[in-house]
Image (spheres, rainbow, N blue to C red):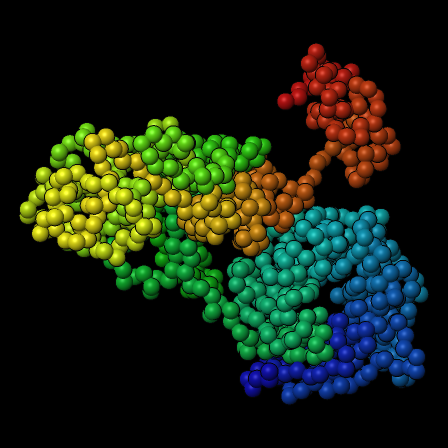
Amino acid sequence: MEKMSRVTTALGGSVLTGRTMHCHLDAPANAISVCRDAAQVVVAGRSIFKIYAIEEEQFVEKLNLRVGRKPSLNLSCADVVWHQMDENLLATAATNGVVVTWNLGRPSRNKQDQLFTEHKRTVNKVCFHPTEAHVLLSGSQDGFMKCFDLRRKDSVSTFSGQSESVRDVQFSIRDYFTFASTFENGNVQLWDIRRPDRCERMFTAHNGPVFCCDWHPEDRGWLATGGRDKMVKVWDMTTHRAKEVHCVQTIASVARVKWRPECRHHLATCSMMVDHNIYVWDVRRPFVPAAMFEEHRDVTTGIAWRHPHDPSFLLSGSKDSTLCQHLFRDASQPVERANPEGLCYGLFGDLAFAAKESLVATESGRKPYTGDRRHPIFFKRKLDPAEPFAGLASSALSVFEMEPGSGSMSWFVDTAERYALAGRPLAELCDHNAKVARELGRNQVAQTWTMLRIIYCSPGLVPATNLNHSVGKGSSCGLPLMNSFNLKDMAPGLGSETRLDRSKGDTRSDTVLLDSSATLITNEDNEETEGSDVPADYLLGDVEGEEDELYLLDPEHAHSEEPEYVLPQEAFPLRHEIVDTPPGPEHLQDKADSPHVSGSEADAASLVPMDSSFSLISVSHALYDSRLPPDFFSALVCDMLRFYAEQGDVQMAVSVLIVLGERVRKDIDEQTQEHWYTSYIDLLQRFCLWNVSNQVVKLSTSRAISCLNQASTTLHVNCSHCKRPMSSRGWICDRCHRCASMCAVCHHVVKGLFVWCQGCSHGGHLQHIMKWLEGSSHCPAGCGHLCEYS
């Protein structure tokens, strides 16, 4: 942790010398403060209150202010401050609401000077006036601020912030009578110590509690604030209304903020939780810290620059029970590890790419960016050559523009508005969405919806007996799957026309299974029997291979140049003993006796029971008794959803998730679902599809998404009697003390759905107002306003 670099700074008649070092404390520290000569530092906490001398090589303990036999809550410190005019004067804020002053010049061991017990709750902050030696200001958890004159025993002024808690108070360095205070409700107030009745100015600085503030030591109008919203904001207080001039985004709640001496745009911050590091920011570069100190292993509770005119030394205390002195030269530079490239898509599909000039200077054919031909897609600030980052910001910008019309997203909007996600049976939802996709030219999406309907919405289970058709000349108990043919009606050249072209080098063997009770054959077009409603989840017979590989051997029109096909004997396992086989036709009988015909071919020919009127009927065997369960396709459906999400069509992935619901929700992890939902909702809101977005949130299968429309919803309602805004959470106006939810028609309190006119603030029961407006357009309360309900 200790680094050997050393810095010596000359400040007037004194010299600051030191290096990065640390020392171990007896207990965690809550706050630190430095004396005016930068030679000593005081550390305060719940169980520690000590003064250390800052020497060149180490910290040396000088004084322990926790004296006495019995531990006292007055020594449990939440904050400590060292007066910058009197080196013997200290003040602490105790957790029991007591403000204590300490006089280090007292000869006794107990240095306690005065006790102020006017606060009722924990005192969060104490602050001395920068130029007045006897003025002390405190801010407490009870919502009050008190100004003490150390020459008197009681406070001289009490300031009420009308809030739950005061988190920080700071006297202005330039304005003698002004101090700033921060509150847990996000407000910042400016007070004049001469007027304790009301604040001079109040504004909302953060979305949440404001934990700290600090006046700029050089610019009298700048005030830095930090809050729970992970932001540090710099306000210009010289204008009529507070103006935000800079905003720094951090990664955790900001607990302390201190301007860096002699550096107008630098400030240091530390976090209240999670992040243990100390950052020094340049407010002109709000996203990358200028320096970072990583010595602490727990939350940093206090930071202070060692001297008001020296920017090199920073002191810090932490809950890890260490006191550190950081040398700015030893800090790590996050900018050195930052990514030097940037990539961003525009609203109309344009792609902007920024990188170092050295990376893109060698590429030929790249034209400089001259501006968008339609309208600006982004704005680039012109750099000031005097700024310290002017040399670092030398980057080249390339913009790849979309052709007009090529990046149209009309299909997305039409699909989002026309898709049906709930309120119908699953089969109707799939059919409707498939029709919408097909009309928009998205055939693959339409086919996907159709396949989902087949998988999850089959017309019914088909018994296995209906799939295994009986074979016979007059068979009528089963549904034929193919047309019947008569050998006499077939064209003489049919066999040769339907043969495969074997000259292409195909070496696949054709195997046909024949028995005494069935013959397999397929026609050229492979047509199904008209009117057949049997689902096609079967194989045609026991034949393997393509359907067009089945053909007939016509002995009268055999081609001599084609090779002779021999059916292997082992490919015809007999299922039962063949008895009384009828003799085949004479031409087949002659062929079987011919010496040019193999034995297996002769056997096959002898098994064909044909006569002049025998028709060939195909036989089908089902793969399963009925059909595959939908769970069999779950993995395939999940892969399909991931495919669409990876292709960028998160709309399809979310729509299928909502339509299928619990059928696929269990197979996709919650984090992935939440990512898909947030992406789709963000796209919908970009296109101002608020109703569709709310419907997606309402129907979502993710718990984290379904609660989005149940929070952060604020309705500003006026009282229907006094017309003033309702500030309380209930329906009783805190001004006229009358119920604002009275029905203007029946004059009863509305306990269900309440509808009101935003023009006159009158309303009532939904059904009553709708019925009233059917016959009259004037307000039922008689105010004369023309109300409208749509």
- The quadrant the N terminus occupies is bottom right
Q: Within the image, what quadrant is residue 454 found in?
A: top left
Q: Is residue 702 visible?
A: yes
Above or below, 747 against 408 in this view is above
Q: Position of residue 8 (x, y in %)?
A: 58, 83
- Between 325 and 46, the one lying in front of the other is 46
Q: Is residue 370 visible?
A: no
Residue drawn at x 47%, y 66% as measured from the top left: 338
Residue found at the far left of this picture? 561
Above or below, 332 against 741 in this view is below
Q: Position of residue 635 (x, y in %)?
A: 48, 52
Residue drawn at x 82%, y 58% as measured from the top left: 141
- Between 607 and 154, the one lying in front of the other is 607
* Left-right relation of 18 to 430: right
- The quadrant the C terminus occupies is top right
* Left-right relation of 153 to 184: right
- Between 517 and 136, the one lying in front of the other is 517
Q: Position of residue 680 (x, y in %)?
A: 51, 44
Residue found at the far top of this picture? 775
* Left-right relation of 293 to 566: right
Residue drawn at x 59%, y 78% as measured from the top left: 327
Q: Position of residue 693 (x, y in %)?
A: 56, 39
Residue drawn at x 84%, y 34% as measured from the top left: 732
* Left-right relation of 200 to 242: right
Query: How many callouts does the rendering have?
Result: 0
